[in-house]
Image: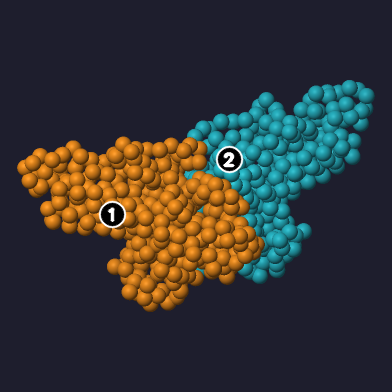
Chain colours: A orange, B cyan
Amino acid sequence: MHTDAIAWSPAGGVRLLDQTLLPAAVRYLEIDGIDRMVEAIRMLRVRGAPLIGIAAAMGLAAAAEQRAAAAGSSGQGRAAEAEQAGLTAGWLRAAAAQLAAARPTAVNLSWAVERMRRVGEAALQSGERPAAVAARLRAEAQAIWDEDAAMCAAIGRAGVELVPAGATILTHCNTGQLATGGIGTAFGVILAAHREGKGIDVVADETRPLRQGGRLTAWELARAGIPARVIVDGAAGALMARGEVDLVITGADRIAANGDAANKIGTYALAVLARAHDIPFYVAAPWSTFDLTLASGDAIPIEQRAAEEILDSAAGVRGYNPAFDVTPAELITGIVTDRGVLRPPYAAAIAAAAA
Amino acid sequence: MHTDAIAWSPAGGVRLLDQTLLPAAVRYLEIDGIDRMVEAIRMLRVRGAPLIGIAAAMGLAAAAEQRAAAAGSSGQGRAAEAEQAGLTAGWLRAAAAQLAAARPTAVNLSWAVERMRRVGEAALQSGERPAAVAARLRAEAQAIWDEDAAMCAAIGRAGVELVPAGATILTHCNTGQLATGGIGTAFGVILAAHREGKGIDVVADETRPLRQGGRLTAWELARAGIPARVIVDGAAGALMARGEVDLVITGADRIAANGDAANKIGTYALAVLARAHDIPFYVAAPWSTFDLTLASGDAIPIEQRAAEEILDSAAGVRGYNPAFDVTPAELITGIVTDRGVLRPPYAAAIAAAAA
């Protein structure tokens, strides 16, 4: 199942649901060219680790198509056509680098654009015409999207067994259709448990500063008909203390080889609180979120965002606004992936899943 | 030192700084009568456990003065004058009860209005004229205010020794001049440490949903020239994990006889996180915050506020919005009071301080 968060635009380009306006307004953007896709990713018009990978891939494919269409067939030979179209290896590398740099923490973004770059360069090296190169890029972006949808479905199937009947599930940020190419990661598990009739109830952290929980997860929960309450982030601990949370599940933006997981700011605190209250804490993510080049979470780059997201006026003090934090593997009960539920010790489990 | 958060209005009534508009606008309200003071307290135009006690006391005194002024001297005897003025024991009890019910969690509110009621009833029983009764009420409200300012100063003196040189202090909500009748409680300790040249640095939780940290504490920190950063509530744990917090200090709205402390939602999570990171966690409060009639925090009533404070639109889900949580005594390193720093075991320390 594909979400309406993203689509190929009939006009060429990519159609994005502007998530900064939700839930007040459902408005679509026509994204044309690399610069505009970078802006949309940076401003969180499209967000969610898997979805920004998909969006970047589609943006790159759409930009290549437009170059190919403008070039047409010159009859001067394929290399000259590619040059004329500007659809060269140099352009491809620059566009891929620009997209990958839009946000630093989620590895899915660089993973997806790197995959696109390799496909495009291979097509160029084998002397394909611009239109054929662009078609290959579009097919690859579509594959990334389709595979993510399949990974979400697999995550939901794998994770549903972790959810006891009647459980109250606490989640953070947004991990659903608005964050992925399918039913979601942590949200995919929630949706699967709901559809199996487990009678679950969800508590959604609003997730300051950008309120992806209060705006986006709330919207998705309501559309799915799942009983849910939104809380401020500071209330999660008090709910746990009162025995009102049975399990916590979040997404991830990058998972290191030892199982340390970067995710939206506030996730680490939830993991500490869950441990203090003996509540299982799960992370759900597709395989594209794992970065086996990093030994531990210490090496994950953490995006620092502008203080204006926190401070709505010139209060005269600074803001400090890291967008993510890292939850150490020892606080994670299990990692739900499309390759099954990984359990500690994670280094071994992740290596086995990679093999 | 008195804050400009509250004043006797030259027009009669009470002048309040409307804290819901800070820091964008500095606007004063002229509060006339019990109903308007209840509204101001309920809507958090005036807030902070000590300050709402002061505001309620001043509001009661001002309402009594207006009744006394309207009555004048009828020459029909004192009891008849009081009756005519409507300045009766019945009115006093009803007004006190109405004010005390405006918000349920902070005990300072009921403590202050109960003190006012006793003084007023004693004056009425001894047959004083309405103007004299009103004057006694005004003097008592002023005493409550002055005593709070003195308690804040004493808290600052007692707490300053807990702050190491160069410490980064994390605080939650607002506990300064906008929350008290003086320099503040937790903020009083921060201000005292700053004035002693300890070279401190403050991290202020923004404190959702009403952002008393991001709006009010930030404003007070800037006015005091204290180096400070505002963070979202979810970032506190990640900062602690990186070793960037040396101590946590918050206020309290009610402290039970065993040391359990109710405070703004999010405080409990901070205490759990501080314990997990071996960071001292202090509570600062005047003696008027202790409720020795409650054996433990389980008995503290927790105010539930409207979901609209969290959810800015009809997202189709419910909100759950407790305004406070309770931190168990075992997570509190020390309680800084105007009677000194209390240390565990708190039941004994509190009983000794009460004696």
- Asked if A213 appears above or below A338 in the picture, the reply is above
> Looking at the image, which residue is at 62% across and 50% down?
B320
Residue A89's disc is: none
In the picture of the structure, the residue carrying the numbered disc 1 is: A140
Dot 1 amino acid type: Glu
- Asked if B211 appears above or below B291 in the picture, the reply is above
Q: Residues within 10 Å of mark 2 (few under 14, many from 20)?
A: few
Kindly report the distance in space between the C-alpha atoms of the residues bearing marks 1 and 2.
39 Å
- How many dots with numbers? 2
What is the secondary structure assignment of the residue under circle 2? loop
Where residue A26 sits: x, y (%)?
46, 38
Dot 2 amino acid type: Ala
- Asked if A46 appears above or below B338 in the picture, the reply is above
> Looking at the image, which residue is at 92% across and 31% down?
B79
Asked if badges 1 and 2 are on one and the same chain, I answer no
- Asked if B241 appears above or below B124 in the picture, the reply is below
> Looking at the image, which residue is at 53% across and 53% down?
A205
In the picture of the structure, the residue carrying the numbered disc 2 is: B314
Q: Quadrant of residue B67?
A: top right
Where residue B182 sits: x, y (%)?
60, 45
Is A164 placed left or right of A290 in the picture? right
Query: The disc numbered 1 marks a residue on which chain?
Result: A
Is A94 placed left or right of B150 in the picture? left
What is the secondary structure assignment of the residue under circle 1? helix
Where residue B88 sits: x, y (%)?
86, 34
Query: The disc numbered 2 marks a residue on which chain?
Result: B
